[in-house]
Image: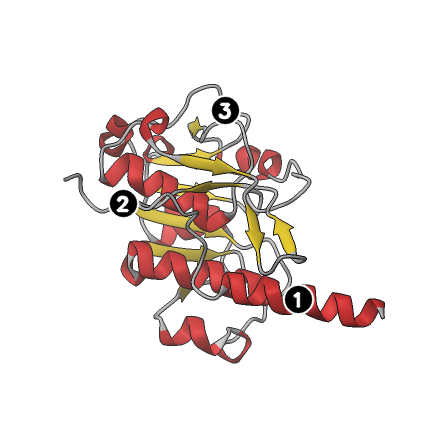
C-alpha cells in the first residue's frame, strides 16, 4: 500500500453551497482530515463562516493564497513536488506518481458544468507539473477519490470502473441525470457523497413546487 498523499483544494467559490459542503465532508472522510487542505478562502473569512459540519470533521483551511501556503507555510522548496490535476494535461495520473509528488492540487474546476477553464490561472500561478484524470468532467470529490485510488491503491486509471452521466431515479416519473463521471463501488453503484441523493431530490421537489 502506498503512503498517504496530501490533497489541496483551492476554494474558488464565495461561501459554501450545500452541494460543496457534502462534497468536502465526503473528501475529509475519504482521505482523512490531516491530509486535506482548503486554501485561498476569501480574505476576512473566520471560523464562523465555515459550515459547522466541516468544522466538526476537522477541516484544515486558510485564506492564504496557494503559493505562499505551500512554499512558505508548508516549506515546499521545489515545485516539482506539486502536481496540479488539469483536464488539459497531456499525461494521465499513474500509480508511480505517488513517488514523484507530495501534494496533489485541485481547483474549483472539476465540478463545473459546463466546464470552465479556471485551471489556467491556477496553472500559471503554480508553474508545476500537471496530470490528467481522463477526458470527462468529475465532481471534486470524484476527482479526489480517483486520485486516491490511483496513488494509494496503486490502481491504473484504465482499471477503475466508472459510470458517465448516471441517472438518479426517485420514482417512475422523477429522475435526474448527473452530468459528470463517477466511480462505481463494488456493487456497481455510483459513489455520491453521503446525503447528495437526498439533497438533489429535495431541490428537484422544490423546483417542481415553484413551477406550479
Q: Position of residue 58 (x, y in %)?
A: 34, 70
Circle 2 — which element?
loop
- From this view, report whether residue 192 is shown above or below residue 110: below
Say what secondary structure mark 1 lies in. Answer: helix
Quadrant of the image containing the C terminus: bottom right
Q: Is residue 102 shown to the viewer in this render?
A: no
Residue 13 lies in quadrant: bottom right
Query: Residue at left 57%, top 54%?
Result: 169
Label 2: few (<14), some or many (≥20) within 10 Å? some
Residue 108 vertical placement versus 206 (above, below): above
Specify the farthest residue to the right. 212
Vertical position of residue 47 compared to residue 32: above or below: below
- According to the image, label 3 marks what residue? 89
Q: Earlier in the sequence, mark 3 or mark 2?
A: 2
Q: Is residue 8 left or right of residue 179?
A: left
In the drawing, what numbered circle is on residue 203? Answer: 1
Amino acid at each position: 500500500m502506498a503512503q498517504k498523499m496530501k490533497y489541496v483544494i483551492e476554494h474558488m467559490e464565495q461561501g459554501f453551497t450545500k452541494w460543496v459542503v457534502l462534497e468536502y465532508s465526503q473528501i475529509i472522510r475519504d482521505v482523512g482530515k490531516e491530509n486535506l487542505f482548503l486554501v485561498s478562502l476569501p480574505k476576512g473569512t473566520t471560523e464562523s463562516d465555515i459550515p459547522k459540519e466541516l468544522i466538526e470533521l476537522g477541516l484544515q483551511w486558510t485564506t492564504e493564497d496557494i503559493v505562499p501556503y505551500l512554499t512558505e507555510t508548508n516549506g515546499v522548496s521545489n515545485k516539482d513536488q506539486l502536481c496540479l490535476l488539469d483536464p488539459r494535461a497531456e499525461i494521465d495520473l499513474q500509480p508511480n506518481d505517488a513517488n514523484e509528488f507530495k501534494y496533489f492540487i485541485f481547483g474549483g474546476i472539476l465540478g463545473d458544468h459546463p466546464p470552465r477553464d479556471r485551471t489556467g490561472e491556477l496553472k500559471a500561478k503554480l508553474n508545476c507539473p500537471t496530470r490528467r484524470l481522463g477526458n470527462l468532467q468529475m465532481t471534486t470529490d470524484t476527482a479526489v477519490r480517483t486520485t486516491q485510488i490511483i496513488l494509494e491503491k496503486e490502481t491504473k486509471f484504465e482499471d477503475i470502473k466508472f459510470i458517465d452521466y448516471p441517472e438518479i431515479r426517485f420514482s417512475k416519473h422523477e429522475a435526474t441525470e448527473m452530468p459528470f463521471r463517477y466511480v462505481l463501488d463494488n456493487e456497481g453503484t455510483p459513489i455520491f457523497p453521503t446525503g447528495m441523493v437526498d439533497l438533489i431530490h429535495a431541490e428537484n421537489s422544490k423546483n417542481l413546487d415553484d413551477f406550479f
